Image (tube, rainbow, N blue to C red):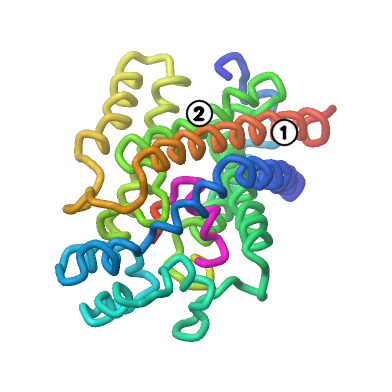
């Protein structure tokens, strides 16, 4: 990991930040929805996943 | 190009999610099903008159069962275990598995969403800090993801089976999310920054939530056998490690092959 440099990324710095922050926001939204959201439907659907991933459940 | 980068992350996450579902069905779900046989038994069987077991049962399902002591007492007396009740929640609340999916399909769907989510988070971190995920370093990326999201939070809040005693859900979720975030920043400072100060600050960030301490239940009595809990904690951490390694390597492969190919 430490040997890689930013120069090998084919995106410009600005694009890289836009893509990175979009990815972080969408990813956080998905993980929150599947793992943490306090909705009975989401909880019941994701029940075994939440336990398996060690998300605080119940 | 941005879309391509995000799509690559999503595809890697979906593949890892499918893998995770298979791993879970083999090692984790049987333990969850086993534990559910004990879940909710304590109040009805052993100590019918006391307040505390009912309170424990109520804590564990605070998101599903009404918050009143009456609700807790009713749930304690109910012959239907809370685990079983999950699947019939639709009669009382807006519960039940969405789209009328089977339990397995629901788990698969949740794993796909979680896989894509973690994959996007990993890709997002990689893009923001400017260290690409490649086939060569993908396993390391995955291992660090696992450390930040699973192992370090598990020090305070081990993966829990249904029926385990636990503190208030909201408190645990806040501690869990904060610990994962602080651990991720700490690991970055520790592993990728050369300055000694950064490494010390990184260690401090990793240690801080552990020193602060995770919310713990007041009463740790549980009907679920301890051996089952130990097996489950190891199985959950092992399958999530496999998930993150697969995710990191596939992300790296897709990046090398399709995104950063020249």
- Residue B113 lies, with reference to residue B237, above or below; the image says below
Kindly report the secondary structure that dominates the magenta region of the rendered protein.
helix
Q: Residue at x 49, y 56 (%)?
A: A35
Q: Can the viewer see residue B49 in this picture?
A: yes
Which circle marks residue B250 in the picture? 1
Disc with the residue nearer the chain's start (1 vs 2): 2
**Badge 2 density bin: few <14, some 14–19, many ≥20, Cα 10 Å:** many
Q: Residue at x 32, y 60 (%)?
A: B169
**Badge 1 density bin: few <14, some 14–19, many ≥20, Cα 10 Å:** many
Q: Which residue reaches farthest bottom? A: B91
Which corner quadrant holds the N terminus of chain B?
Answer: top right
Q: Which residues are magenta?
A: A44-55
Q: What is the CA distance from the residue labelled 1 to the residue labelled 2?
A: 15 Å
Residue under pointer 2: B144
Q: Nearer the viewer, residue B27 or B202?
A: B27
Residue B138 falls within the magenta-colored stretch: no
- The image position of residue B68, as x and y in percent, is 23, 80
Q: Nearer the viewer, residue B193 or B43?
A: B43
Q: Can the viewer see residue B181 in this picture?
A: no
Left or right placement of residue B237 versus residue B208 in this view:
right
Query: On the image, which quarter does residue B239 sit in?
Result: top right
- Residue B65 lies, with reference to residue A8, above or below; the image says below
């Amino acid at each position: 990991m430490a040997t890689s440099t930013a120069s090998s990324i084919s995106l410009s710095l600005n694009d890289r930040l836009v893509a990175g922050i979009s990815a972080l926001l969408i990813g956080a939204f998905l993980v929150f929805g599947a793992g943490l959201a306090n909705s009975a439907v989401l909880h019941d659907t994701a029940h075994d996943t939440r336990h398996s991933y060690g998300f605080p459940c119940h | 190009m941005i879309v391509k980068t995000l799509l690559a992350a999503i595809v890697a996450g979906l593949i890892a999610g499918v893998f995770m579902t298979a791993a879970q069905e083999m090692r984790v779900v049987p333990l969850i099903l086993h534990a559910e046989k004990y879940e909710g038994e304590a109040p009805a069987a052993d100590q019918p008159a006391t307040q505390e077991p009912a309170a424990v049962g109520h804590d564990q399902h605070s998101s599903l069962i009404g918050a009143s002591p009456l609700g807790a007492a009713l749930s304690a007396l109910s012959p239907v275990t809370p685990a079983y009740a999950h699947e019939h929640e639709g009669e009382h609340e807006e519960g039940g598995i969405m789209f009328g999916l089977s339990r397995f399909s629901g788990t698969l769907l949740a794993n796909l969403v979680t896989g894509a989510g973690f994959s996007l988070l990993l890709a997002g971190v990689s893009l923001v800090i400017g260290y690409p995920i490649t086939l060569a370093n993908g396993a390391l990326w995955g291992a660090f993801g696992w450390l930040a999201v699973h192992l370090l939070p598990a020090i305070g809040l081990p993966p829990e089976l249904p029926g385990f005693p636990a503190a208030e859900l909201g408190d645990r979720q806040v501690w869990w999310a904060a610990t994962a975030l602080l651990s991720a920043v700490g690991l970055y400072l520790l592993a990728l920054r050369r300055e000694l100060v950064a490494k010390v600050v990184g260690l401090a960030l990793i240690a801080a939530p552990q020193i602060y301490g995770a919310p713990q239940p007041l009463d740790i009595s549980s009907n679920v056998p301890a051996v089952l809990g130990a097996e489950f904690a190891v199985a959950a951490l092992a399958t999530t490690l496999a998930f993150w390694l697969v995710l990191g390597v596939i992300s790296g492969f897709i990046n090398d092959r399709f995104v950063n190919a020249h």
